[in-house]
Image (tube, rainbow, N blue to C red):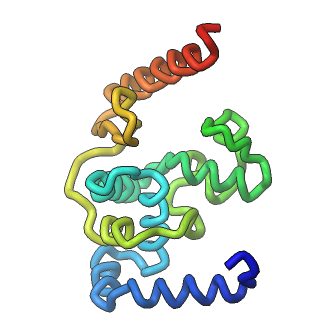
Amino acid sequence: PPNTKPEELIEIMVKRFRKEWKPEWSVQAANLKHTPREIVTIASLIETEAKLRDERPIISSVIYNRLNRDMALGVDSTIVYASKLEGRWRNDGKVYKSDVERRSPYNTRIYSGLPPGPVASPGRSALEAALYPAQTSYLYYVREPARNDGAHNFYDNDRDFGQGVQALRKWEQQRDAQSNGGK
């Protein structure tokens, strides 16, 4: 209800989390050498990045592969979250240079490792993906511009990833030109 107090909302969320979190998930988290909090943080990244359920374990694998290599995660949703925390998010769907350069422990382009905590409230499928990632060699993903469903292309090297980024940027420019009447 609109008049729900923050304390009540937090209580509801914690109760729901405890209902969803299974004891065996704590064991699996330990097997992955992560705490439940870290798993929830990883799941929050998956929740904000993966629009398609079947891509969640693959995006999870990218996160783990990058963590295992001590690479910065480079997850855009963490940059958005950092900008929102500072009241600087423009809310137009674009990540600006000022966002990318923002000094925040949530900026996973600047800082390697996990951010200090979750950036969203993950659902069950994101939690499961964080606990049971696909086994891949992927290190990168980019939105698939030919599809309008949030699908991604996955890459295991810089060169192919760079080409994927360029294809997405080209598509975005074309889309923006069309929405502006070709101007």
Q: Residue furthest right?
A: 87
Q: Relative to residue 84, is residue 21 depicted above or below?
A: below
Q: Residue furthest left?
A: 135
Residue 5 spot, x, y in % from top left: 75, 84
Q: Residue furthest front?
A: 1
Residue at image point 34% right, 51% down: 52
The reply, left or right, for residue 4 in relation to residue 154 is right
The reply, left or right, for residue 97 in relation to residue 68 is right
**Nearer the observer, 90 or 133:** 90
Q: Relative to residue 58, is residue 97 depicted above or below?
A: above
Residue at image point 52% right, 90% down: 15
Residue at image point 38% right, 85% down: 21
Residue 168 spot, x, y in % from top left: 44, 26
User: Could you say which quadrant of the image residue 117 lies in?
Assistant: bottom right
Residue at image point 59% right, 68% down: 116
Mark count: 0
User: In which quadrant will I find the C terminus?
Assistant: top right
Q: Relative to residue 180, is residue 165 depicted above or below?
A: below
User: Could you say which quadrant of the image residue 22 lies in?
Assistant: bottom left
Residue 107 spot, x, y in % from top left: 61, 52
Q: Is residue 107 visible?
A: yes
User: In which quadrant will I find the N terminus?
Assistant: bottom right
The reply, left or right, for residue 88 in relation to residue 123 is right
Q: Relative to residue 102, is residue 132 depicted above or below?
A: below
Residue 112 spot, x, y in % from top left: 52, 54
Q: Is residue 65 visible?
A: no
